[in-house]
Amino acid sequence: MHLPLALLLLLLHTIPALGTPQNEQFEEHLTLRPLPDGKVHAQFRFITTVSDPLKGVPFDLADREEALHTTLLPLSLTQLLRTYYTPELHLSLNAGKWDPLRWGQPGGALRTGAEMWAWVTDSRAPSGEGEGEGEGEGEGGRWQGLTNGLAGLFCASLSSQMEQRTTSPRLAFRPEGDLPSYTPHKLYHASHPSESICTENLTPFLKLLPCKSRAGIAQLLNPHRAFDADWHGMGVHVRWSNSSAGGETEVRMEVGVVFDPVRVSGGKREWSLKSLFDRTITRSCPAASSSVLTVQLPEEMHELLPQPAKMLSSDGVFEAVYDLGSVGEEMDVGMRWLEDRFDYATVRYTPPELIIRRALKGGSTGLSELSVILSNTRAEPRRVLYVETLPWFISLFLHTLQTEVDGVARDDIIQSISYLPPVSPKPTLLEITLLLPASSEVHLTMQAEKGFIRYTEHQPDASRGWDLPAAVVFPLPLNASSSPAKVAIGGGEGEGRIYSSTLLVDLPTPDFSMPYNVIIMSSTLVALFFGSVFNCLTRRFVVLRMPAEKGKGKAS
Amino acid sequence: MPVRLPLLIPAFLLLLRFGLILSPLSPWLRDDHQLASPLTSFTRLKEGIWLFQKGIDPYHGGVFRHSPLTLALFTTLIPPLPLVSALVWTAADGLAAWCLGEIWRARIAPNADEGRGLLLASLYLANPYNLGPTLALSTSSLDNALLLLSLRFAVLQRPSPAVLLLALLSFSSLPAVLLLVPLVMIVLSGPRATAVPRKVDLNAAGRAVGEFALYTIAFAGASTFVAGSWGWVLQTWGATVMLPDLTPNPGLWWYFFTEMFDHYRPFFLLTFSLHPLIYVAPICLKFQHDPLFAFFLLQGIISTFKSYPTLSDAGLYVSLLGLFPEIYTYFRHPLVTALLHLHAAVLLPLFHYLWLDAGTGNANFFYASTLVFGLANGATIVDSLWAGLRSTIGEKDGWDVVQL
């Protein structure tokens, strides 16, 4: 009776030893940032690091025969990364329009809609194992499999119109971490401007966390409040770094929310965790090695409750730090201002250093004009990489590309152009390296043509128009001699990368109820013509003697 | 020698288009769907030149569909500057009109004065169907000049330049290949109608066809050399057959294949591509006595049923009609045909505007006007065909001619 139980216990005990030993660490971090216009930006970060001192390789290169055991990271995610040979992966889902003028440009992707990019191992033969079969074949197949997997994992329609959206930028989206050097990797990037985030995406996201939403800062993630906010987004970022202590894979999961306490409270900008999230932190997550709540302090007079245990200063910004590692009772943090009403008129905004604005001008026919305005507010010149991805039915005419600096035409600011014309149904990819002069506004204009597409290629809501994905601008090091391909663009948690807003284009539509009519009418015309010609060519001409008085009537 | 008054009219028309090309009207018309198709648009030509000069393969994307020979010409000899383009397009139209006059002279009156020939040339230049595409700098105007020049050499019974020019034309307008048969017949039996079909020298015909094949292969080789790969074949010739770009034009293909069910697309592409082919043999057999007339009819069929027509295709056909004054009396329904053409000429720009600019009409409006235009062209061809057959029989009092 006791022997089998003891054996079972023994067996259970030995299982971790069979797999690869993993050093795992989980950290969670919540930053609350009061914004100048009275809103509050809350950024949740859940970082899991897995280091494998034995092999020092990312998941995907670990021995396939060997089982992979992780205690903090869910299998559903690690298995995806292993199956599709992906050392680096970024997925972000955002809704709402990020206002860089008022809210600044913090790190992280701010693209409206969904964006996904990954570095996938290029030339390794598919292993032919279980789940990799079929859609895992080849490199493009791996990307497709990865997309399908993530779409299923996060309940997002990422895998729709894959081919129409996937590009492989040549200069942009360099890896944020390291790539294993012994196999080549290929970049895939896709953006879905009309896909937005909602509860069905957040629920599976929370399930991937070790404490779910039951303890730690994840307790605050109340979908009713998060999706009521002005802006909300989530992201999953996986990267591998070749550190000194062997390889290390970092999985960073983020949720960002911009609340408007002024709207909720009716004129006052005071806030607390309770008022923002309708929840408080009651328990700390035991799996977290560090659990920190940081509040960035505004410059004006304010009152922060409760008093923080620690104050930090970075880049001239003071931060109050609360350690959530040992939360005994209910933990609530709040901020108050010494004012009765918040006055928008007194707010002064500091414009960000780099701004992009984009518009497609022109009527529905003929040529439209794609106009991009890049503003550099720094007092020194900057090099940037401008990346435009457009669906195949928008043709750019690059010979009409014109650049103006503060209203004066200048061609010398374009340093390089990399252009991949659209091949239906693959999108256009345009990457331009620009040198923005100090404190200047640069206008880029080029003509574009909206194409005519088949009636089956239109979306179900064809008259709504097509969302064009946002353009991206990457700041580059000023030193022009270093090749942009070698510089880690977009490194460091997407810092500095900025996105334009999305555009909605109205394509000329055919009449969707007409297929039969058109086939019938056009075919009738062709048949009529053929019949007449056939008739004329094959019938014999005969000369008839006409009695003069009867005329031609008889002849017919 | 005093300046002859009739010469002033074509001179004036040429000067007028030279001025208009340089005016702001030309850029405004340049991307009009009726004047320039994706295969002939000047904007796309400039884009192709830009890509080519930047070292990007212009045939990689779907924007540039001009032939590599055109590309080579415009990157080396003819820079796409406004003044140069205006000169080239004016000269091409002048050449086309002159060729038309020459052909007329060779057919009707080798020794008569040039009055009627000049009238024909002036009509070609004054025809809005020809003027519009020239103002839009559509390369279809250059194609017309090439076709008429080729025909002129054929009429003068010089096979080599005729087939050389036709081979060149087939690179910018693939359906022109169908005109090889009547062209060789003209070279062999002259431009005029004869009572009995002449005996055809099969050796000479074979030589001309062989020469055509040789030139085509040479041009294809040159194209591949220019483009750097065979990619141009799919983007230029392939586009004529596969219709990848569904930009509206006055032809019958674009809306048909916009609305086509996906599983029927290959079948109908094949049908529409092969359809003009079936007319070649019957028309050439029926008009053995008058190959120039067979050429005229086939040109009309091609311009009606080609995949990317512009108005200049119809303009050329209407202008060629002037070469055959003997058939005018035998038209059965000239008034109906003329009214159909008038109707189409009014409806096409109007409904195009209503659909795409004003947004008050939908695609069916413009489709309906292209149907009317197709009907007008078809009616012209059928009526010319009947009148052409009928005119060979002639008139005699008390006798009538019927078809059984």
Image (cartoon, grey):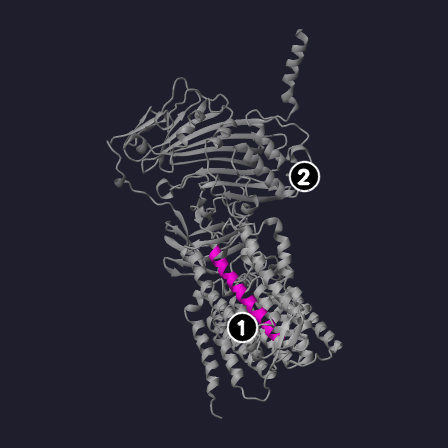
Chain for numbered disc 1: B
For image coordinates 42% across by 23% down, the residue present is: A324
Q: What residue is disc 2 on?
A: A126
Closer-to-camera residue (A307/B379): B379
The structure residue drawn at horizontal position 51% and vertical position 63%, both measured from the top left corner, is B372
Question: What amino acid is at disc 1?
Answer: Val
- Secondary element under disc 2, as helix, strand or loop, is loop
Q: Marks 1 and 2: same chain?
A: no
**Residue B379 part of the magenta segment:** yes
The answer to whether one can see residue A483 in this image is no
> The disc labelled 2 sits on which kind of residue?
Pro
User: What main secondary structure does the magenta stretch of the protein show?
Assistant: helix
**Magenta region: which residues?**
B364-389
Nearest-to-viewer mark from 1 and 2:
1
Q: Residue A397: image x %, image y %? A: 49, 59
Describe the element under mark 1 as helix, strand or loop.
helix
Could you say where residue A15 lies in the image, as x and y percent from the top left? 64, 20
Left or right: A157, with B186 as reference point: left
Q: Does residue A370 lie above or below A62 as drawn?
A: below
- Name the residue at the top extreme: A1
- CA separation in Å, label 1 and label 2: 63 Å
Parent chain of label 2: A
Residue B364 versus residue A339 in the image, above or below: below
Pointer 1 with pointer 2, Cβ within 8 A: no
The image shows residue A169 at horizontal and vertical percentages of 54, 48
* Residue A61 image point, x, y percent: 64, 35
Q: Is residue B40 magenta?
A: no
Residue A16, located in which quarter of the rendered image? Answer: top right
Q: Which mark is residue B318?
A: 1
